[in-house]
Amino acid sequence: MEERLLKLKNLGCDIDGAMNRFLGDKEFYFECFDELMKDPGFEELKTALEKHDIDMAFENAHTLKGVLSNLGLVPLSEQMGQIVETLRFGSEKGLLKKYQELEIQMEGFKSV
């Protein structure tokens, strides 16, 4: 478990902050982390972007950003934040590409 935390820290994650939020419960943290890595919200976001459904995309992206932030997954949270802010202003320009970049970045996290 410590090795996984170190890998996340090396990926730029705020593990100290996350552990404060999780009251030091590493087992629960990784239960949440593992569930997030297979969360259907990512696929729902992609589908909403493909369908040009800005409201649904915003809702999914905003929710995912919150979870990513709570887990201290700073690189992913920042990238999702860019998606959220673009959607907040009613635009979807370039977001499918940003989403694809996020998917690639997530692959590195899934192996942790």
Image: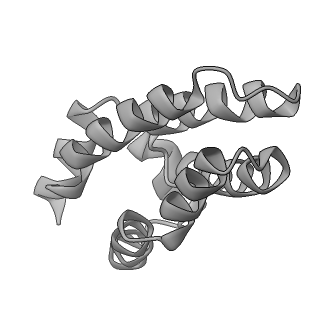
Vertical side of 89 occupied by 50: above or below: below
- Asked if residue 13 can be seen in this view, the reply is no
Q: How many marks?
A: 0
Q: Is residue 18 left or right of residue 3?
A: right
Q: Quadrant of the C terminus?
A: bottom left
State the residue at coordinates (63%, 25%). 82
State the residue at coordinates (41%, 75%). 35
Q: Residue furthest top?
A: 94
State the residue at coordinates (85%, 32%). 88
Q: Quadrant of the N terminus?
A: bottom left
Residue 25: x %, y % from top left:
42, 73
Question: What colour scheme governs how the chains and residues are painted in the rendered image of this protein?
Answer: one colour
Residue 78: x %, y % from top left:
55, 28
Of residues 18 and 65, the one drawn nearer to the viewer in this rendering? 65
Q: Is residue 87 left or right of residue 93?
A: right
Of residues 52 and 16, the one drawn nearer to the viewer in this rendering? 52
Residue 48: x %, y % from top left:
66, 54
Residue 41: x %, y % from top left:
57, 65
Q: Is residue 7 left or right of residue 51?
A: left
